[in-house]
Amino acid sequence: MTIQITFPNELLVAVGEDRPQFTERVLMYTLGQLYQQGDIQSYLLQRLAQCRLPHQPNKVRHEPRKVRRKPAVFPPLKDDRNIARQEISDHFAQLANS
């Protein structure tokens, strides 16, 4: 079963935890509350507390740095399409060999 809850990022800053820590904390509080109310048994609580949540990598909120390099210059297209295709394939073959 999967449950998805959305919290604002300000809550993570206020609590001082990162996303995986906070997610595990919310899970433990929820399980504890269900146990106190008598909705789940202690053996189920133990089993669920040992579960590990799947790790979600932190999403990049900014664009990665630009890669600055010389642009690939293609030979000018002239004449027939077949000739142009041949010139381009020759150009890539030269790049692959070097």
Image (cartoon, rainbow, N blue to C red):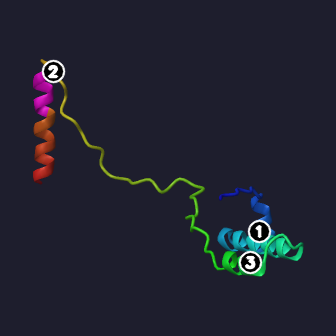
Q: Nearer the viewer, mark 3 or mark 1?
A: 3
Q: CA distance from mark 3 to mark 1?
A: 29 Å
Tell me the residue that label 1 is attached to: 13
Q: Which residues are magenta?
A: 81-87
How many residues crowd mark 3 within 10 Å: few (<14), some (14–19), many (20+)? some
Q: Is residue 82 magenta?
A: yes
Residue type indicated by callout 1: Val
Q: Judge by depth and name the residue closer to the eye, 68 or 21.
A: 21
Residue 1 in the image: x percent, y percent? 65, 59
Q: Check whether the beta carbons of the residues at disc 3 and disc 1 lie within 8 A of each other.
A: no
> In the rendered image, which quarter is residue 3 located in?
bottom right
Q: Residue at (80%, 70%) from the top-left corner? A: 30
Badge count: 3
Residue 62: image location, x then y, percent: 57, 55
Q: Of callouts 3 and 1, which one flags the residue occurring earlier in the amino acid sequence? A: 1
Q: Secondary structure at mark 2?
A: helix
N-terminal label among 3 and 2:
3
Q: Nearer the viewer, mark 1 or mark 2?
A: 1
The image quarter containing residue 34 is bottom right
Image height of 79 relative to 15, above or below:
above
Q: What is the three-letter code of the residue carrying label 2?
A: Arg
Q: Is residue 81 left or right of residue 14?
A: left
For the point 70% across and 73% down, the residue is 24
Q: Which residue is the site of mark 3?
A: 45
Determine whether, in the image, residue 10 is placed left or right of residue 73.
right
Instruction: Please give the label number shown on residue 81.
Output: 2
Residue in the foreground of this view, choosing between 61 and 59: 59
Which residue type does callout 3 highlight? Leu
Single out the mark in the foreground, 3 or 2: 3
Residue most extreme to the top: 80
Q: Quadrant of the C terminus?
A: bottom left
